[in-house]
Image: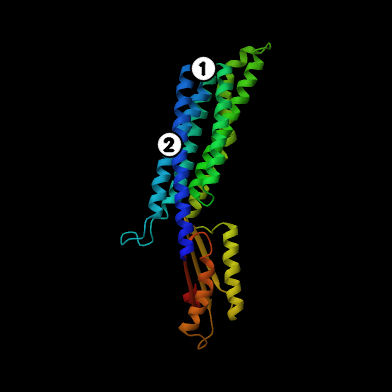
């Protein structure tokens, strides 16, 4: 990696840790307030929102540990480093968020079956509005702090889900207040659990996306389309410049690391090590312009089986 690339990576890591720390503090403040307020007001939607937010503290802490592990240098025990810690943390976040939503949905159904909740609609409206503004501001702040981090994106997904949940509570509280002025005021007891079910349905896709993203990297899937297109363009330019045949290109992203393998099958007695190094340098130098820790392997061989 070039000196500029190392500086960019170090800056990204610092920004990533600022995101995780800010998310940790934000979750503590909002989650504690929601749980206390929800218990006092007997509002299941508030308690759920608070528990969901407080769960983010453990997840943010896990992400912070993953960030530190991924940034550690390769060692004898871990010769390729610990980049897998990043997709593992993303996967855990998605699974934990999914479990929280499932628990909330089951609890809401039980509340409906038991006859509803006596939560104040004014409390729901006030909390929902304050929480939505708080969560939305955190999303904006986190997006500014880190733009090239899987862990930061996972945190932002979580806070975006929190914003949606809070907006649902706000709308529900307003609807409940309006319902109290009609002949259907008796239905107000179902507003609170109904809000939880609606919120769960709205954000259900978010944990699925996180789990899929984590699994994709752990299973060595292809990197994002824009990164893959850049790799293909760099390899194609080198192939054209040196008159080489179409190579076999493999690539995958694991955390901050990008693995690229390029194999050219060439005729016998046409290439030596010096010429092969020129091809390697033409590809590797360009790949190091990408915002990743690039581990690239470029090989020229006369044996088809070795390329495969």
Mark 1: secondary structure: loop
The residue drawn where x is 47% and y is 41% is: 95
- For this orientation, the residue located farthest to the bottom is 269
- Mark 2 or 1 closer to N-term? 2
Which residue is denoted by mark 2 in the rendering? 57
Which residue is denoted by mark 1 in the rendering? 114
- For this orientation, the residue located farthest to the left is 76
Q: Nearer the viewer, residue 269 or 39?
A: 39
Q: Give the alpha-carbon distance from disc 2 to disc 1, as whole Å.
A: 32 Å
Q: Residues within 10 Å of mark 1 (few under 14, many from 20)?
A: few
Where is residue 102 shown, x and y percent of the image? 50, 33
Which colour style is shown?
Answer: rainbow
Where is residue 194 shown, x and y percent of the image? 58, 24
Q: Nearer the viewer, residue 303 or 122?
A: 122
Rendered position, 74 above or below 115 = below
The residue drawn where x is 52% and y is 42% is: 142
- For this orientation, the residue located farthest to the right is 182
The residue drawn where x is 37% and y is 55% is: 72
Residue 301 visible, this orientation: no
């Amino acid at each position: 990696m070039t000196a500029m690339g190392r500086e960019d990576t170090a800056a990204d890591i610092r920004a990533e840790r600022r995101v995780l720390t800010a998310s940790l503090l934000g979750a503590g403040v909002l989650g504690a307030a929601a749980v206390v307020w929800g218990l006092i007001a007997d509002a299941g939607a508030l308690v759920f929102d608070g528990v969901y937010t407080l769960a983010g503290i453990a997840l943010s802490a896990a992400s912070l540990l993953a960030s530190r592990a991924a940034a550690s240098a390769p060692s004898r025990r871990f010769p390729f480093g610990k980049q897998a810690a990043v997709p593992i943390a993303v996967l855990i976040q998605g699974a934990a968020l999914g479990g929280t939503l499932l628990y909330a949905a089951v609890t809401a159904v039980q509340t409906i079956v038991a006859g509803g909740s006596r939560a104040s609609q004014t409390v729901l409206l006030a909390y929902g509005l304050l929480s939505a503004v708080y969560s939305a501001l955190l999303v904006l702040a986190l997006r500014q702090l880190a733009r090239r981090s899987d862990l930061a994106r996972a945190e932002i997904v979580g806070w975006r889900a929190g914003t949606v949940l809070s907006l649902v509570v706000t709308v529900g509280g307003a609807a409940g207040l309006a319902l109290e002025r009609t002949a259907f005021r008796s239905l107000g007891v179902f507003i609170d659990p109904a809000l939880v079910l609606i919120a769960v349905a709205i954000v259900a896709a978010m944990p699925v996306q996180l789990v899929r993203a984590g699994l994709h990297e752990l299973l060595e899937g292809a990197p994002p389309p824009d990164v893959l297109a850049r790799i293909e363009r760099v390899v194609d330019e080198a192939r054209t410049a040196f008159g080489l045949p179409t190579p076999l290109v493999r690539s995958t992203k694991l955390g901050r690391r990008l693995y690229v393998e390029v194999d050219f099958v060439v005729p016998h007695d046409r290439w030596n090590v010096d010429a092969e190094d020129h091809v390697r340098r033409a590809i590797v130098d360009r790949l190091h312009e990408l915002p990743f820790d690039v581990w690239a392997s470029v090989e020229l061989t006369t044996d088809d089986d070795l390329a495969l």
